[in-house]
Image (cartoon, grey):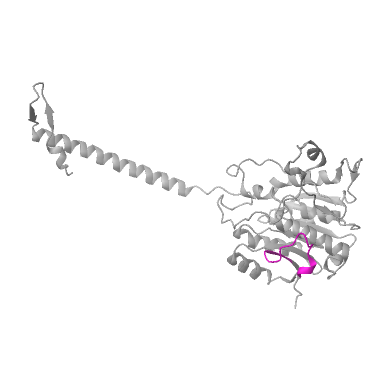
Amino acid sequence: ARVPASCCRVVCPTDGGVHMGVDLTVLAVVCLLAAAVYQAACVKRTNDDDDTTMASEQQPPPTDSRSGLGVQPVLLALPGPSFEVPNFSPPSADKDSEPGSSRRGKRLRIGDWPLYLVVGDTGSLEEARHTVQTATSVWDCSIVLAKYLERQYTTKKTTDDVVRAFRPGARVVELGAGTGLVGIAAGLLPGFEPESVVLTDVEAVVPQLQANIDVNVVRSSAAECEQTVLRNAAALRAAPLDWLALNKHADQLKPPVDVILAADVVWVEDLIEPLVATMVRLSGPDTVVFFAYQSRSSRADEVLFGLLKNHFEWRKARHDEYDPEYSKPDKLAVYVMTRKQQA
């Protein structure tokens, strides 16, 4: 070991204020011993760090609630809302809110029926898994698709896709439902008499979906002065569906279904392929898919539509098909899809 030059001379004060030099031989030995001890300690610490690294590399990464994804998947950008957030609070919560509260905002209605949502507390972003966290938000695509369906079904204008798909006795499935806004809106379409409307998401989100169904099935308000029961109460239900574990739940939905709804379901690039596989598994020659999509990544666009074109054909909704108040054709679009005909 090399002894620093500064260690070669130590000056010690004496009572008389006179300074005398310390024996350099003794000092050199002390410094050499100290350097050897320090070097040995550094080697031990390096070895310990290597062992810790190797141990951590041997452990499988924590998984996300989507089954098999790491806790830090590549998330696509999630922009804030483009519209004023509607008031989804149930009447009891709205009645208890203070004047001027954000709960006093505008209601989102399907026909004459206001939509109510109950959002559970998922804790902080650090504590909640991202799948559950995103499921508690109402994204623009959900509002746009819900109002698109209402406009097309009630006015029967510009296209008959919605009218043809939402025929009496139809079986409807919403994928990645989150709050369930789109599926519940489908159940509220005036005059629609479905066999079933099933709102699906991962198991952790199902209780929230069921709570939102329940609050829309039986609700009361000062304006109505009595309880009203959703006409399609028996048809609406929540069910688990993990795109990465299709064999676990897909058959319970009895595919092929008549209608598939999907709004803003591409937020993790690794989930694109499982999503398309789920759409293929649940669809048949007569299935109509209403897919509301907001582009966040050119690579994600390429992967998504590259996979879809192998199984589906589609058209993009025209500007005049959207609800005038809830449309952002420059940012997001509704695609009406059907299965490709087999040659």
Residue 65 image position (x, y, % from top left)? 63, 49
Q: Is residue 326 magenta?
A: yes
Q: Of helix, strand and loop, which mostly describes the magenta segment? A: loop
280 lies left or right of 12: right
Between residue 108 and residue 63, name the one nearer to us. Answer: 108
Residue 213 image position (x, y, % from top left)? 81, 47
Would you place residue 7 above or below residue 71 in this image? above
Can residue 156 be seen at all in this image of the molecule?
yes
Would you place residue 291 above or below residue 8 in this image? below
**Name of the residue lying farthest toward the bottom:** 343
Q: Is residue 95 magenta?
A: no
The image quadrant where one finds the C terminus is bottom right
- Which residue shows up at 33% across the image and 41% down it? 45
Magenta highlight range: 317-334
The image quadrant where one finds the N terminus is top left
**Name of the residue lying farthest toward the top:** 15
